[in-house]
Image: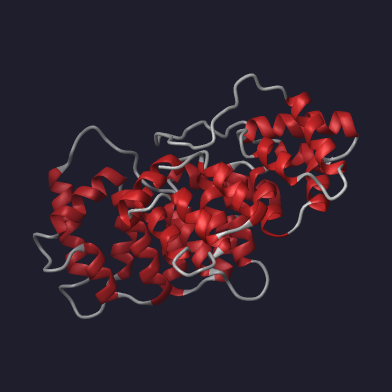
């Protein structure tokens, strides 16, 4: 059965994740998977489909609870719930709901696969996921990618990108990043800051390999101090230096890395603000961030969004989306600020 095999190996979900969580979707209390499964079954069978109930149930349960509901549904209806949802829903709402039926790592792996499969590469998605996820998240994405697609993530990334951009993504996917240490190594901080300066602003051309190894192998707290120290060598900060030294996808990747090292939730808030600048939202970006971060740090992204734009994320989503898609996103958003 597709459902069972798709969920196998997902119990490691919250293991080895050292970053604190700020989710908007938390476990529902008094959770009853059988009751929820019955509600979903009725909602799907209703003439015209009762989308409101599907949204109400699935956006207010965690991935593990949704999985329990799917097992209960299968026992009741003798059908696979994901397949049933697929045929009952359509458009943007379907994309959100099916995204919620994957664990965070499965969702990220599927998004990466979608960005490199077929003609052309969706670099934006690839850069966002590979450059913003922690080493432990990337390690899990690699495992899940292999389980879901029977392919090696490193090989797929290498086969679909080229040059220094490919080398940087591969270095990140190889998850060689050091764990944060309680000991602050000032000598190493100075050495790395100097090396970044010598490899870029100081010389003609850029020694991208040095930048890549430092940014893919050092711990995040170490790099935060390196970028600070960097300012005593360079007339430009790290972001300005990247803009001067490299272009295209490589520039976007380095900027995403540095933005995420400094404040990951602000990075996502900026992307959401950018995606909802014009009248209608860039749904792909909004869906990807809300679905992939709602059980990770969307609460903190909401706070950064408010500080950045002066408006709440809830209000902004209300103004730039409509219908059931809007209802689902607002529910995942977890309230107004």
Residue 251 coordinates in the image, percent (x, y): 36, 71
Which quadrant is the N terminus positioned in?
Answer: top right
Which quadrant is the C terminus positioned in?
Answer: top left
Q: Is residue 168 left or right of residue 202?
A: right
Of 127 and 82, which appears nearest the observer?
82
At x 81% / y 30%, what residue is drawn? 38
The quadrant holding residue 58 is top right
Residue 198 coordinates in the image, percent (x, y): 17, 68
The quadrant holding residue 200 is bottom left
At x 50% / y 45%, what residue is drawn? 293
Residue occupying the far right of the picture:
78
- Residue 193 seen from this side: yes
Residue 52 coordinates in the image, percent (x, y): 71, 43
Residue 20 coordinates in the image, percent (x, y): 39, 34
Q: Is residue 289 left or right of residue 322?
A: left
Q: Is residue 45 above or below residue 237?
A: above
Q: Is residue 183 above or below residue 124?
A: above
Residue occupying the far left of the picture:
232
């Amino acid at each position: 059965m597709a459902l069972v095999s798709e969920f196998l190996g997902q119990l490691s979900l919250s293991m080895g994740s050292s970053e604190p969580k700020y989710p908007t979707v938390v476990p529902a209390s008094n959770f009853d998977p059988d009751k929820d499964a019955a509600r979903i079954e009725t909602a799907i069978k209703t003439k015209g489909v009762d989308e409101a109930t599907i949204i109400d149930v699935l956006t207010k349960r965690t991935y593990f609870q949704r999985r329990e509901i799917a097992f209960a549904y299968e026992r009741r209806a003798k059908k696979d719930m994901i397949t049933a949802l697929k045929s009952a829903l359509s458009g943007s709402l379907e994309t959100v709901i099916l995204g919620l039926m994957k664990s965070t790592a499965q969702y990220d792996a599927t998004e990466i696969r979608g960005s490199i499969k077929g003609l052309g590469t969706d670099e934006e998605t690839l850069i966002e996921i590979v450059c913003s996820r922690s080493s432990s998240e990337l390690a899990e994405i690699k495992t899940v990618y292999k389980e879901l697609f029977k392919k090696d993530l490193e090989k797929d990334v290498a086969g679909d990108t080229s040059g220094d951009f490919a080398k940087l993504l591969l270095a990140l996917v190889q998850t060689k990043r050091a764990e944060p240490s309680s000991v602050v190594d000032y000598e190493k901080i100075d050495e790395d800051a100097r090396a970044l300066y010598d490899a870029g602003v100081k010389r003609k051309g850029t020694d991208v390999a040095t930048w890549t190894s430092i940014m893919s192998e050092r711990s995040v707290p170490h790099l935060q101090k390196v970028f600070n120290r960097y300012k005593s060598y360079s007339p430009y900060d790290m972001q300005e230096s990247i803009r001067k030294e490299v272009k295209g996808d490589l520039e976007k990747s380095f900027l995403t890395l540095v933005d995420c090292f400094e404040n990951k939730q602000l990075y996502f808030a900026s992307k959401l603000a950018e995606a909802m600048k014009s009248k209608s939202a860039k749904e792909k970006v909004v869906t990807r961030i809300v679905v992939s971060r709602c059980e990770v740090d969307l609460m903190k992204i909401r706070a950064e969004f408010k500080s950045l734009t002066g408006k709440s994320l809830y209000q902004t989503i209300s103004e730039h989306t409509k219908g059931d898609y809007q209802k689902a996103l607002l529910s995942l958003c977890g309230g107004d600020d």
